[in-house]
């Protein structure tokens, strides 16, 4: 029995190791086959929605990329009440995450934006250092307390879904007018009205969103683990020439299962030209500084 402590120590170490590997994709046969199929089609898959939170790090994102061949890009939320709540924090984040990995590679660094005036708050010098900007439509309107309303939280109720939808469509189109690169989780609906997807997301409404995304060069995200967008939207988007990007939207460092990505690839028979290469948009011109000079006649 004198080996028992040693055996227990080895066991706990291997458990830790197994736990530590959870940031890598599980090497199931199905996963390997799906990845091989994507490679056969010439697709280079990139996860543009890896949050550095909940134990996820630049190093783990790099190791995941190395082990799987699925490219990693990292981001964090910029805005009031979010981790990058000012330009100094944004600068620190970019500084820390644009460092080369041990293999010499650098991962694309982006932000997710939630405040609708973010492009007026961001320091243009820091904006230029980013690889991309991602936004979703999941915060809309204000709560009774005057806080931005997070549509995914329990307790969100919508009395008149059709009237709400008109506002939500306008909200979505306004976000597409911002200098963003990726629309995340497009056509998301809060749980209380998710069963009304088909009547609310009419083809005419989907067309408005897709044509604006195409016109502005904004990629439409397929997110692991999300029910949105539905196949009808994906098919219409493909037929209208939209570009797609992939994301996981993690809350911890565990690799999410990518079934949704592979389903979209099969459903749409995605080819390399259908995948977005998200790039930075241009910030709108700054408003001219206020002047005391009377206007010249
Ligand atoms: Zn996110």
Image (cartoon, helix red, strand yellow):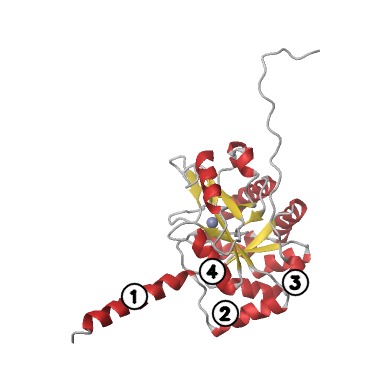
Residue beneath disc 1: 13
Q: Are marks 3 and 4 in contact (CB under 8 Å)?
A: no
Query: For the view shown, which residue lies furthest in the left direction?
Result: 1
Tell us which disc is closer to us: 3 or 4: 4
Residue beneath disc 3: 271
Expressed as whole percent of the image width and height from the top left, the position of residue 288 reads 69, 26
Query: Who comes first in sequence, dot 4 or dot 2?
Result: 2
Q: Are marks 3 and 1 in contact (CB under 8 Å)?
A: no
Residue beneath disc 4: 64
Query: Who comes first in sequence, dot 2 or dot 1?
Result: 1
* Residue 258 in sight here: no
Residues under labels 3 and 2: Cα distance?
Answer: 19 Å
Residue beneath disc 2: 31
Query: For the view shown, which residue lies furthest in the right direction?
Result: 297
Residue count near mark 2 (Cα–Cα under 10 Å), binned few <14, some 14–19, many ≥20? some
Tell us which disc is closer to us: 4 or 2: 4
59 w.r.t. 34: above or below? above
Task: Say which of 86 and 148 sits in front.
Answer: 86
273 w.r.t. 178: above or below? below
Residue count near mark 4 (Cα–Cα under 10 Å), binned few <14, some 14–19, many ≥20? many
Task: Say which of 54 and 136 sits in front.
Answer: 54
Question: Does residue 269 appear left or right of residue 107 in this picture?
Answer: right
Residues under labels 2 and 1: Cα distance?
Answer: 27 Å
Query: Who comes first in sequence, dot 4 or dot 1?
Result: 1
Residue count near mark 1 (Cα–Cα under 10 Å), binned few <14, some 14–19, many ≥20? few
Residues under labels 4 and 2: Cα distance?
Answer: 14 Å
């Amino acid at each position: 029995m004198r080996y028992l402590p040693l055996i227990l120590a080895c066991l706990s170490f291997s458990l830790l190791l197994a736990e530590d590997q959870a940031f890598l994709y599980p090497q199931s046969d199905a996963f390997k086959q799906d990845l091989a199929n994507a490679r056969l089609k010439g697709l280079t898959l990139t996860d543009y929605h890896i949050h550095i939170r909940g134990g996820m790090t630049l190093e783990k994102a790099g190791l995941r990329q190395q082990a799987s061949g699925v490219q990693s890009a990292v981001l964090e939320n910029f805005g009031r009440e979010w981790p990058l709540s000012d330009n100094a924090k944004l600068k620190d984040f970019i500084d820390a995450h644009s460092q080369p990995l041990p293999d010499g590679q650098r991962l694309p660094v982006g932000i997710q934006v939630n405040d609708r005036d973010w492009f007026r708050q961001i320091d243009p010098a820091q904006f230029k250092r980013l690889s991309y900007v991602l936004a979703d439509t999941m915060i809309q309107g204000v709560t009774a307390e005057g806080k931005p309303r997070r549509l995914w939280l329990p307790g969100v109720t919508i009395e008149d879904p059709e009237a709400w939808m008109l506002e939500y469509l306008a909200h979505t189109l306004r976000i597409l007018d911002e200098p963003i690169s990726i629309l995340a989780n497009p056509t998301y609906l809060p749980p209380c009205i998710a069963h009304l997807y088909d009547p609310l997301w009419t083809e005419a409404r989907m067309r408005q969103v897709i044509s604006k995304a195409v016109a502005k060069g904004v990629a439409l995200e397929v997110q692991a683990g999300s029910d949105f967008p539905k196949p009808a939207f994906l098919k219409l988007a493909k037929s209208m020439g939209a570009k797609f990007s992939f994301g996981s939207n993690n809350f911890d460092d565990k690799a999410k299962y990518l079934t949704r990505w592979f389903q979209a690839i099969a459903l749409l028979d995605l080819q390399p030209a259908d995948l977005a290469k998200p790039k930075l948009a241009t910030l709108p011109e700054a408003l001219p500084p206020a002047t005391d000079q009377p206007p010249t006649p």
